[in-house]
Each structure stands twice: as structure tokens, then as C-alpha cells.
């Protein structure tokens, strides 16, 4: 099986790295993230036989989990009470998204009720696809809608950060590995592996990112972990995340582009309006600075928004506290809400 996958993965790696090189050559922003994403997306739409990197890509999320966990300091914990007001907006935000999204996907995109429900929920792409599959949704439509949501947000959010908020996306993401103490590197590797595999063993959702986040946060709060993962690890994580988004479009047909992908992109426009309204509310009311408010309520994935927060120099703890709350609420309440309402929706 490995030998069968290797040629496709080698081609994928070559295309992803060529995307990095092109973005570096043209001095475009975030070359390790957007270069692979754009190159693999174009190649996938042209019919190239690409394939993701499996466990290696999942491991990239553990790097981000450690980076987030390392930002959970006693100072951040002391600030949590001041976040309660903005965190309290999230359940209302999710409810409004669902009330608009489910009818949109049913009436405009022609999805069945189950698929429409899980397509509208702003949770993690993998989690919503799994829950939807168990409930009988159209998995292909569901996965394409959520991947399109991540793709569009990852393209639009940096543009907004630079042109609306005047943010530079060139903030240092971490020290080189050679400049970090060996003890810190060992602790990071241990946190990543123990958190990821331990979380998976106990059935923790999003174990690859949440497990390392929990372990590294404990080490940080205990005064043992003081650094983020090295720059090289975070650049590789960017490359793998960008590649994964692009590869998700392998095998997409023209009909799917016209119906499912276009519908998903249109829904992101609706989400953008809602996110803009909420951002203005939290900003004008003094609940969050503008950049943190924007990143906290942008309906992207936690891994992708974490990376943007890092390169934008935003308060990573504030941003991730809101995304984790959104994801937790959707994952815990979504299936229960589905069972309560599905009969009425049908």
C-alpha cells in the first residue's frame, strides 16, 4: 500500500514545493502556506493524481497544538474572566449561522436535510464530516463544503488583515531549532507525541491538536515549557496544512464545482457578513482589539486560524479560546440539536 501511494505523494510534494518556490520568487505572503495550497489546488482541478501525506499531515497539527499550548501561561489564565463576555456571544453566533445555513443549503443548493444541517455547522471539517456520515449525510458534498469554507477563509482573511487592519503577516513565528535549548525541544516532542497518541487512545476529538495543546499547556503553566516549536517545524506545518487543503479537491467534477463548491463559497460570503457584524460588536464594545476580534470570530479551522494568529502577531490565547469554544459547542451540542430538530426540518 505504501509503495502504491508513494508516486502520488512524491508528485504532490514536488508540486507543493514548487508552489513555495514560486511564492518566494514573487515575494507573495505566507509562501509555505499559500504556495502549496494554490499549486496543489490548481493541479487537483487539472486532474493530477495527488495524494495527501496521511499521518505526517496529522502530525503537523500536533506542532500547532504545542504552539498554542505554550501560549497558555498564568497571565493568560488570569485574563480568562475578561473574555467571558465575548465568549458568551459564541452560542448565539452559532445559532444564527445554523438558522441561516440550513435553509440555504436545502433550498439554494438542493442538499438533503441531514447534509444541509452538517454543512451549515461551523465546526471542524473532519468532525462535521464524520458526524454527518454517521447521520446519513452525503459525505462528498459535506467534505467539499467544509474544505471550501477553509479555502475561502484562508484566502480572504489575510487580505482583510493586511488591507483593512494594516497588519503585517511577517511576524517571526519562532526561533530556529539551533537557538532553542535541547530540554525545550525534548519537552515539545514529548508533549506532541504523548498528547496526540494519548488523546487518540481515549477518544479525544481532534486529538492531534487538542492532545498536544493540553499537555503543553500543563507544562507551560507548570513553568517547564517557555518556547514555541522551532521555526522549521512551524514552516513545515504550514506547508502540510496548505497542501492538505489543495489535495482535498482531487477528483472534483465540473458539476460539483458548479453546485457544491460554488454553494459552499456563497455560504462563506454569508458567514463573512455575520463574522463582520460580530467583530464590530466586540470591537466597538471594547471586548476585544480589532485584529483579535476578527481572528476570533472568523469561521475557519482552529489549525488555520492559529497559524494566521501567529504570523499576524495577534494574541494567540485570545483567538484560540474563542475557536475552541466554538468547536466544542458545535461538536457537543450539534448532534443533540440534530436529533431534536431533524424531524421538524424534514
Image (cartoon, grey):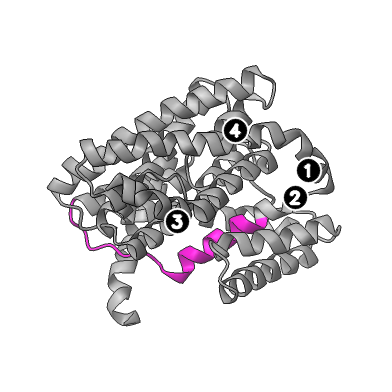
Nearer the N terminus, badge 3 or badge 2? 2
**Residue 103 within the segment the image draws in magenta:** no
What residue is pinned by disc 3? Answer: 335
- Disc sitting over residue 89 in the figure: 4
For the view shown, which residue lies furthest in the front direction? 344
Neighbours of disc 2 within 10 Å: few (<14), some (14-19), many (20+)? many
Answer yes or no: do the residues labelled 3 and 4 have beta carbons within 8 Å?
A: no
Element under label 1?
helix
Distance of label 1 from label 4 (alpha carbons)? 20 Å
What residue is pinned by disc 1? Answer: 76
> In front here: 172 or 142?
142
Answer yes or no: do the residues labelled 1 and 3 have beta carbons within 8 Å?
A: no
Q: Which of the 4 image quadrants contains residue 25?
A: top left
Distance of label 2 from label 4 (alpha carbons)? 22 Å
Q: Residue at x 55, y 49 (%)?
A: 329
How many dots with numbers?
4
Q: Which of the 4 image quadrants contains residue 3?
A: bottom left
Distance of label 3 from label 4 (alpha carbons)? 21 Å
Does residue 96 appear in the picture of this structure? Answer: yes
Q: Nearer the viewer, mark 1 or mark 3?
A: 3
Q: Which of the 4 image quadrants contains residue 182?
A: bottom right
Q: Residue at x 36, y 33 (%)?
A: 100
Please provide the residue range marked out in magenta. 46-66
Element under label 4?
helix
Distance of label 3 from label 2 (alpha carbons)? 29 Å
What residue is pinned by disc 2? Answer: 72
Nearer the N terminus, badge 1 or badge 3? 1
Amino acid at each position: 500500500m505504501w509503495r502504491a501511494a508513494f508516486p502520488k505523494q512524491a508528485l504532490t510534494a514536488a508540486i507543493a514545493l514548487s508552489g513555495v518556490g514560486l511564492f518566494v520568487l514573487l515575494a507573495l505572503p505566507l509562501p509555505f502556506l499559500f504556495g502549496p495550497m494554490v499549486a496543489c489546488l490548481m493541479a487537483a482541478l487539472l486532474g493530477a493524481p495527488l495524494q495527501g501525506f496521511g499521518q505526517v499531515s496529522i502530525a503537523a497539527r500536533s506542532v500547532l497544538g504545542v504552539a498554542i499550548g505554550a501560549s497558555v501561561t498564568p497571565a493568560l489564565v488570569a485574563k480568562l474572566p475578561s473574555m467571558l463576555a465575548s465568549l458568551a456571544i459564541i452560542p448565539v453566533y452559532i445559532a444564527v449561522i445554523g438558522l441561516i445555513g440550513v435553509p440555504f443549503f436545502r433550498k439554494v443548493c438542493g442538499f438533503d436535510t441531514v447534509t444541509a444541517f452538517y454543512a451549515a455547522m461551523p465546526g471542524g471539517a473532519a468532525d462535521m464530516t464524520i458526524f454527518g456520515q454517521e447521520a446519513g449525510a452525503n459525505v462528498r458534498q459535506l467534505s467539499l463544503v467544509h474544505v471550501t469554507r477553509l479555502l475561502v477563509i484562508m484566502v480572504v482573511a489575510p487580505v482583510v488583515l493586511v488591507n483593512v487592519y494594516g497588519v503585517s503577516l511577517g511576524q517571526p513565528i519562532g526561533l530556529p531549532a539551533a537557538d532553542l535549548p535541547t530540554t525545550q525541544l525534548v519537552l515539545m516532542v514529548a508533549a506532541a507525541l504523548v498528547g496526540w497518541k494519548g488523546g487518540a487512545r481515549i477518544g479525544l476529538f481532534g486529538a492531534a491538536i487538542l492532545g498536544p495543546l493540553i499537555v503543553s499547556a500543563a507544562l507551560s503553566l507548570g513553568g517547564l515549557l517557555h518556547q514555541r516549536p522551532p521555526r522549521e517545524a512551524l514552516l513545515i506545518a504550514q506547508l502540510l496544512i496548505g497542501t492538505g487543503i489543495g489535495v482535498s479537491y482531487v477528483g472534483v467534477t465540473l458539476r460539483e464545482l458548479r453546485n457544491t463548491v460554488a454553494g459552499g463559497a456563497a455560504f462563506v460570503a454569508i458567514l463573512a457578513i455575520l463574522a463582520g457584524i460580530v467583530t464590530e460588536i466586540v470591537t466597538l464594545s471594547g471586548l476585544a482589539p480589532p485584529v483579535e476580534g476578527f481572528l476570533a470570530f472568523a469561521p475557519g479551522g482552529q489549525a488555520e486560524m492559529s497559524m494566521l494568529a501567529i504570523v499576524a502577531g495577534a494574541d494567540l490565547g485570545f483567538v484560540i479560546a474563542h475557536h475552541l469554544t466554538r468547536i466544542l459547542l458545535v461538536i457537543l451540542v450539534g448532534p443533540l440539536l440534530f436529533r431534536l430538530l431533524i424531524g421538524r426540518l424534514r
